[in-house]
Image: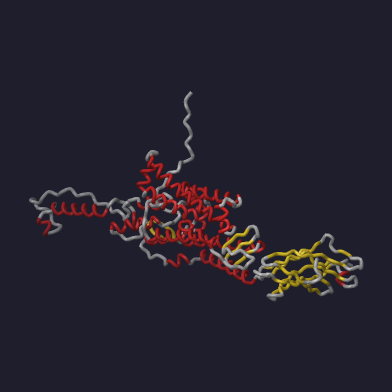
Amino acid sequence: MTDQPSPPSLYAPREPIFPRKVTGFFRRFKWAILIVTLGIYYITPWIRWDRGPSLPDQAVLVDLASRRFYFFWIEIWPHEFYFVAGLLIMAGLGLFLFTSALGRVWCGYTCPQTVWTDLFILVERWIEGDRNARVRLHKAGWNLRKWRLRLTKWAVWLAIAVATGGAWVFYFTDAPTLARDLVNLTAHPAAYITIAILTATTFIFGGFLREQVCIYMCPWPRIQAAMMDPDTITVAYRDWRGEPRGKGNNPRRSKAQALQAEAAAQATGPGEARYPGTPYRQDAKPAAPVLPPIAETGDCIDCMACVNVCPMGIDIRNGQQMECITCALCIDACDDVMDKIGKPRGLIDYLALSDETAERAGEPVKPLWKHILRPRTILYTAVWLLIGLGLVYALFVRSDIELTVSPVRNPTYVTLSDGTIRNIYDVRLRNKSGEDREFRLRLSSDEILRIELEGTDDLSLNIPADTTVLQRVYVTSRPQDQAAMNAATDLRIWVEDTTAQTRASKATTFNGKGN
């Protein structure tokens, strides 16, 4: 019985990527964004904002217990979730807009996976050395030095990961209080569980998976193609200028051409030199074999600098690829090489694919603003602005006083001993201001109706600051009045803030005996 060959594996093991250190404009720009974004993330929970004695003083707080979201002077209540939904829609449209105009700039500069991976690679470079040193360490056996470097690196990574998870939970409760409870081991178990989960994901994603998260776990690389077109500005390689590639082409080509010219001069006699085009004399020197023509090569010297600095491990010279996050580090690396060999920068650059075609044909390229302002980006911008303006308008016109009215329809109405018809309503009064307020209730209708509050003879209620109160309200009609005899009568319940002189109302109906 012959052995059957085993089927080929469908799984390709990950090849570790060791990006080389690079300097340049885009690398400095990425460092600046990293510092700003991480600074915002870690510092924001500690910013204080005075909202009054009865409200939390943390500037940004997602208060799950009270079901509120505080953002500096803005307070979002549960029934105002449309603000959050609007912000999420704006974020999505913004991502579409920037991808359509400038490619995957979100992925390359501000995506949390990119930011923390950059930070982890920086730590790795500080401890283990630059690319060549890390490659040698990776291939070396597990000796004392390798264990020491790896354990040191993992310890720093773990500290960053713990700080990441710890900073996240501070957004959901008072940061100083939670920090003290965490140190004293008296915090709620949910805090420790959340920190542990976020610590593990940050440590694994930023330290080990890295580009695998972008390629296999993130859906955006597969969606971005629908957002881009030939006018999108993205990182690309000018192959018309760089191909065919050659190692150190200019110096060698110049030397070979000089030798070829010298050999050609020695092959001609003095008569031919004086009278070009005449036949050789008999005493002329024998012609030397003509050297083959020197092939012209492009500006790319195939130094692999663009590949060695790429955090995704791809070769941008192979064209547009799903893995490219347009971080532009290959631009810095290539510009540095072009400076050294005396060639103009821009062999790898931010450009539109339509411009690359025009450059190849020697035609003028479009101005940058024509790439940015085109129908797709204008549409995205218009919709984004409309949603933003709508949210701002809704934010500034909303009142500090709100009410909802829920009729109790079981039974539909109650007949009292004297024949009076009574309807019952649950009125929810909401005081969104930062201080206690007195609310006065009344009603309006075309028919004669009377309003009463359960538990008080007055029509006024004291509502604490930032609180919702549920009040039962009775509306009655005398038996001889038209509202008691009608099947339904329209009415409106009003609430007035006697301090701020603001009002709100809700329409409802009064049910009578009918005809």
Residue 317 locus on image (x, y percent): 38, 52
> Residue 149, how many percent across, how many down?
40, 45
> Between 312 and 198, which is closer to the camera in this rendering?
198
Residue in the image at 87% along x and 64% along y:
414
Name which quarter of the figure residue 505 lies in: bottom right
Q: Residue furthest bottom?
A: 501
Up the image or down, 86 lies above or below 330; here it is: below
Which residue is pictured at 9% across the width and 53% down the height?
281
Q: Residue furthest front?
A: 184
Assign the C terminus to one quadrant of the image: bottom right
- Tell me which residue sits at (35%, 50%) in the image: 304
Q: Is residue 28 left or right of residue 9?
A: left
Along the viewing direction, whichever of 298 and 83 lies nearer the viewer: 83
Residue 157 versus residue 92 in the image, above or below: above
> Visible in this render: residue 191?
yes
Judged left or right of residue 292, residue 234 is right
Rendering quarter of residue 14 = top left
Residue at x 72%, y 72% (from the top left corner)? 438
> x%, y% of residue 410?
83, 59
In the image shown, does 274 or 477 lie closer to the viewer?
A: 477
Looking at the image, residue 493 sits to the left or right of residue 17; the answer is right
Residue 375 position, x and y percent, is 51, 65
Relative side of 172 to 27, left or right: right
Tell which residue pokes out farthest to the right in this image: 418
Q: Quick check: can you spot residue 89? A: no
Q: Indicate the colouring scheme.
A: secondary structure
234 vs 281, nearest the viewer? 234
The residue furthest top is: 1
